[in-house]
Image (cartoon, helix red, strand yellow):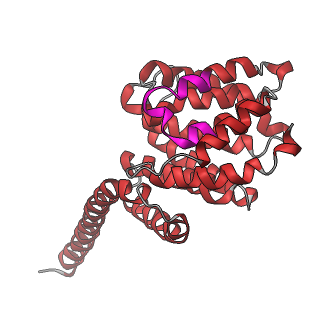
Amino acid sequence: MSSNNLKNCGLGFAVLTTLCACSLNRTAARVTSGVIDRGLPAVFSQADTQYVKEALPANLQLMEILLKSDPDNGKMLVNTAQGFCGYALMFLEDENPGRASLFYAKGEAYALSALKGATAATAKKSDVPALFWRNFCRASYININRDKPEAIAELPALEPDLEKLLTLDPGYYYNGAQSLLGAYYSMRPRMFGGDPDKAIAYFKLALEGPGGEFLLNRFMYAKLGAVAAQDQELFEKLLDSIISAEPRDGDTRLPDEVAKIKAKKLLEKKNDLF
C-alpha cells in the first residue's frame, strides 16, 4: 500500500473514530437525560429543603455537561431551565438576588434554545413546557430587578406569551400561566398597564383545581397580588393558610416546604409592605 493510501486510511480511521465517539457521547447523554427526566419527581418530592439546596447544584452542572454532547435535546433543555429557575426561586432570591438573577438568565437561555425559534404566534402545544419556563424565568428576573428601568421595559413582552399559554394548556404546572399573569399585572406600574384587580382575578384562577393545593401559587398571590392591591387582610390570610397547611407527600412536597419557609419570612415584613 502506498504512503498516500496509508495516509488516507489513517485519516479516514481518525474521522470514523471521532464520529463514533460523538455518536457514543450523544447516546450516553440521551440515556442519562432520560434517567434525569424520570428522576426529577423524586427531587421535588423531598421534604428536606436544605438537602436539596446542597445537592441540586451538582445535578445542574451534570445537566449542562450532558447538553454539551447533545445540545438539541429538548427535554434536557427544558429540565435544565426548570432546574436553574426553580433553584433561584427557592434558594437564592431572598439571600442573594444578584446570583438569582444569573440563574434566571441561564434558565431562560436554555428554555429559549428548547423553543427552537417558536414564538407566541407559532408555538404549538408541544412547545408549552419551554414557553412556560422561558417566561417563568423572565418574569422572576424582572420581579427581583424592578429597580432597573431596563428590566421593567421587558414586561410587555411577557403578555403575548402568557396569553398563548392560556390558549394552549391553561393547566400546565398547576395553572402556571394564570399565576404568571397575576404576577404580570402586579408588577407593571399602574400608569403602564398594571392592574391589581386583574392580578387578583388571575391569581384566583390559579388557585382553582390542583393549583389551589400548590402552595407557591398562594405565596405568589400574597407576595405580589395582595401587596399590589394593598390588601393586608388578604395578605395575612394567604400566608397563614400556607403556614398552617398540612404537609402533602408527592411531587410538590419540596416547593410546598419552601413556600412555608418563605411565608413565615414574608409575614414578618408586613409592616414594611403596608
Say how many tags the image has: 0
Task: Let me know if residue 191 is in the magenta part.
Answer: no
The residue shown at (29%, 60%) is 35
Figure quadrant of residue 141 = top right
Residue 222 visible, this orientation: yes
Q: Where is residue 149 in the image (x, y as percent from the top left)?
A: 85, 37
Quadrant the N terminus occupies? bottom left
Residue nearest the viewer, comparing 246 with 195: 246
Q: Where is residue 207 in the image (x, y as percent from the top left)?
A: 53, 29
Helix, strand or loop: magenta stretch: helix
Is the residue 105 above or below the residue 121 in the image?
below
Is the residue 149 above or below the residue 67 in the image?
above
Write the start and end of the magenta stretch as one range.
202-219
Q: Where is residue 8 in the image (x, y as percent from the top left)?
A: 22, 72
Figure quadrant of residue 7 = bottom left
Is 31 left or right of 86, judged from the image as shown?
left
Residue nearest the viewer, comparing 102 with 201: 201
The residue shown at (67%, 49%) is 263
Task: Let me know if residue 214 is in the magenta part.
Answer: yes
Is 202 left or right of 72, judged from the image as shown?
right
Residue 138 visible, this orientation: no
Figure quadrant of residue 153 = top right
Quadrant the C terminus occupies? top right
